[in-house]
Image: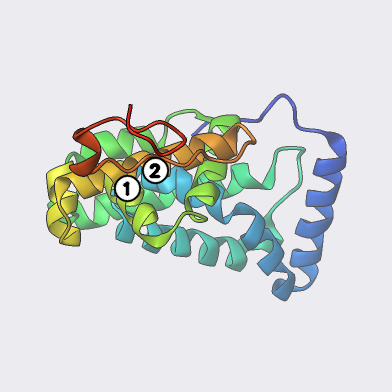
Amino acid sequence: MVVRAPASRRSPEQAEERLLVEAAQRDPSRFAELYEINFERVYAFVVRRVGDRATAEDLTSEVFHKALANVRRFEWRGVPFAAWLLRIAANAIADRVQRAGKELAMDDPPELSADASAPVDLEEVERRAQLFRLVGELPEDQRRVIAMRFAEEKSIREIAEGLGRTEGAVKQLQFRALQSLRAKIEGREPQRTQSYTKASTKGSTKPGGKDA
């Protein structure tokens, strides 16, 4: 797997990351800091390829266990530590597909295995990691809808059945979540959405509260 490092990577960031890696190599308990920094990056990389949240969580955990066990073998060569983690993740995905074969709950395992070795753009991974962090800040019902809709690629009907909600309610939750995410990415507060009821369709009301 080829990993493309972001061109905007700054040397102070590299220096700080190198210190964290060297600290973890001396004292494995310091690996927790690297875990916190890189978790969303690895999870975003994995879930995009496996399309299943439970499998992605399991594989992400496996990646960090392997990284912790082998961190002392990591050699600093100017490439972000995340690139090393993503190589471990790609291998873990390929190994899982090979082991599980048809028993693994995925639509097309051969394609997944091929994708695991494809070039990886760290800037794209970082964007996805940021998105996952923002999704984690959403209210629980919105977060579940977004995860089921885009990570698990379920239809609106499937989500409604799974959550015991109407399709209209699911669409509204998805709309509010996407509006909130868009606002956060653009650095502004999300606008409040209007709630339309049957009563509101009987006539329009001016800001002062009088009927037009």
Q: Are marks 2 and 1 in contact (CB under 8 Å)?
A: yes
Residue 90 visible (yes or no): no
* Label drawn at residue 120: none
Residue at x 48%, y 28% (from the top left corner): 119
Residue at x 64%, y 61% (from the top left corner): 36
Residue 186 visible (yes or no): yes
Left or right: 178 as drawn, with respect to 158: right
Residue at x 12%, y 56% (from the top left corner): 161
Considering depth in this image, is 99 or 205 the residue closer to the camera?
205
Q: Whole-percent x and y of residue 33?
A: 71, 64
User: What residue did someone put label 1 on?
Assistant: 173
Q: Is residue 168 above or below residue 58?
A: above
Residue at x 74%, y 26% (from the top left corner): 8
Estimate the spatial distance between the alpha carbons at disc 2 and disc 1, rounded to whole Å. Answer: 5 Å
- Secondary element at tag 2: helix
Locate the C terminus by quadrant.
Answer: top left
Q: Is residue 122 above or below residue 160?
A: above
Looking at the rendered structure, the kind of residue marked 1 is Leu
Q: Whole-percent x and y of residue 132?
A: 49, 48
Q: Residues within 10 Å of mark 2 (few under 14, many from 20)?
A: some
Looking at the rendered structure, the kind of residue marked 2 is Arg
Considering depth in this image, is 159 or 70 the residue closer to the camera?
159
Considering depth in this image, is 181 or 102 the residue closer to the camera?
181
- In the picture, residue 15 is in which quadrant? top right
User: What residue did someone put label 2 on?
Assistant: 176
Q: Whole-percent x and y of residue 150?
A: 32, 41
- Secondary element at tag 1: helix
